[in-house]
Amino acid sequence: MGFDARFTLALIGWLGATLLALIAFAAACVTPDLVAARLVAGLAVGGAVAGLWRHINRTNRTLARFMEALRYREFAARFDGRGGAEFARLGAALDGAMQDLQGERLASERELRFLEALVDDTPVALLKISASDGVTPANKSARRLFDAHDGIRPGDFAIYGATFAQQLADPVGGRHQLLLLRLRDGLQRAIVRTAALERLGSPIHIVSVEPVQGTLDSVEVAAQTDLVRVLTHEILNSLTPVMSLSRTLDVILDTPEPDLSSAREAAVTLSRRTEGLRNFIDSYRSVARSPEPRPVRFNAGPFAHEMERLFRAEWPGCELALAAEEALTLHADPDLLAQVLINILRNAAQATRHLARPQVRLTIAASIAGVLIEVEDNGPGIPEGSRSDIFLPFYSTRREGSGIGLNLVRQIAVASGWSIEVTGGDLGGALMRLGLPAAPSAADVRQR
């Protein structure tokens, strides 16, 4: 990039003037009795040098002002190309760069306003926790939901629930719970999640609060309706033969010479049917009772071998292949986990008992997310269209099945925070996969 023509001509002019002033000053100095001429020539030299310096320094000052504007994000500033600083190509390039920066800034500001509006209008309440600002609402939903307190300390939120205030005082990233909060509309269950972030080098936490009482009530009503419908159907199915047998027995005993053999047979059948109805009602009671997990840390090896012994005692004719990482640490309720595996292993054995060589495989191994427990068999498998139904209460693919076991398995998994799915396995039958979160470290346990 060369010099501007006007700048070059002005520079030559100032250099010429400086040179002429120097020649005049030198001539006055060598000529006697020209004191006044010397003074005038000296002033001319000083003026020419000052003008030359000002002409050269003008571009530096203009560039400095331009860079200051850039430093303080004044992207509307433009390069001043007047006078000696008129570098057309330099000014055009700098102005173009500034216009690009101004356009990017405007686009960033529009995107920032959109994101701020998105967060502010999000229907889930968001609270921000930081060491400097305390606990503050981050959007409209939070300001509406938590409007009954004053202050920014976690303890100020105790009016909504002591457990909730404790979570705010000791936030842990990745934690989520279903809490009972005291809100404007009364006691409500809410899903409370905590995420750990960093802002300008300082840690902050974001807590989302999503009241779900209305949703839970709707789900509960729907579930109760389904259960009543199933119970009505099953109980009526059981009561119909009971009523018929009762009438038959009454007719037999009402004759002058009752047939005691037929009466005994009817009574035995009646007893068996009422016992079956009682068992069904007991099963329903077990479905209606929610499990309460009490997780502890234990090794996978001994636990897996205990499951193997229980399985072989109940199903000696079924081949069980065990693959467990002996030193792997599990964090779960061992009793509930054992109940889950007993049900899943029993289902696998029942699915293969008609085969010449029934096979079941139990695997316990570490995964990226935590621990994977898989039970696989070589039975007929579960059709893809039925895989989402096998966890429903009283649903069974076997005529003699109660449809209770896998529903209890799912209840325990949900209560414990595990994932559960069914798919096809390498042995050709069903594969039941249970996902457990990783065991917390000792430091996490102390922190909680």
Image (spheres, rainbow, N blue to C red):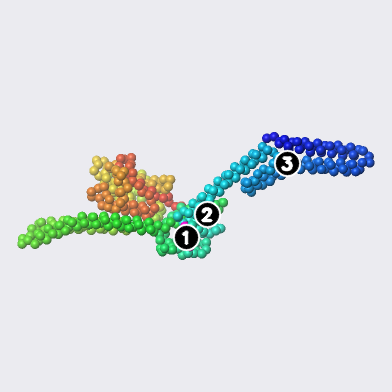
Badge 2 amino acid: Ile
Total marks in image: 3
Q: What element carries label 2?
A: strand
Query: Which residue occupies the foreground of this view, 438 or 29?
Result: 29
Helix, strand or loop at label 3? It is: helix
Q: Name the residue under label 3.
A: 83
In this rendering, position of residue 132 left or right of residue 279? right
**CA gap, disc 1 to disc 3?**
61 Å
**Measuring 38% from the left and 58% from the top, which residue is drawn there?**
214
- Of badges 1 and 2, the one in the foreground is 1
Amino acid type indicated by mark 3: Gly
Residue 381, x across and y down, in percent: 29, 43
Was residue 76 drawn as part of the magenta stretch in this picture?
Answer: no
Residue receiving disc 1: 144
Q: Do the residues labelled 3 and 2 touch (CB within 8 Å)?
A: no
Q: Which residue is drawn at 39% across and 59% down?
A: 213
Q: Residue at x 48, y 64 (%)?
A: 148
Q: Badge 2 local density, few (<14 within 10 Å), some, or many (20+)?
A: many
Q: Which mark is residue 397?
A: none
Real-space Cα separation, disc 3 to disc 2, in angstroms: 53 Å
Whole-percent x, y for residue 448 in the image: 46, 57
Task: Decide which of tag 1 and tag 2 comes sooner along the chain.
Answer: 1
- Residue highlighted by disc 2: 204
Label 3 CA crowd tier, 10 Å (few <14, some 14–19, many 20+): few
Residue plotted at (47% across, 60% down): 144
Which amino acid lies under the numbered mark 1 shown in the image of this protein? Arg
Tell me, yes or no, if residue 130 can be seen here: yes
Which numbered disc, 1 or 3, marks the residue that appears first in the sequence?
3
- Of the 4 image quadrants, the one containing the N terminus is top right
Spatial separation of the CA atoms under disc 1 and disc 2: 22 Å
The residue segment tinted magenta is 141-147
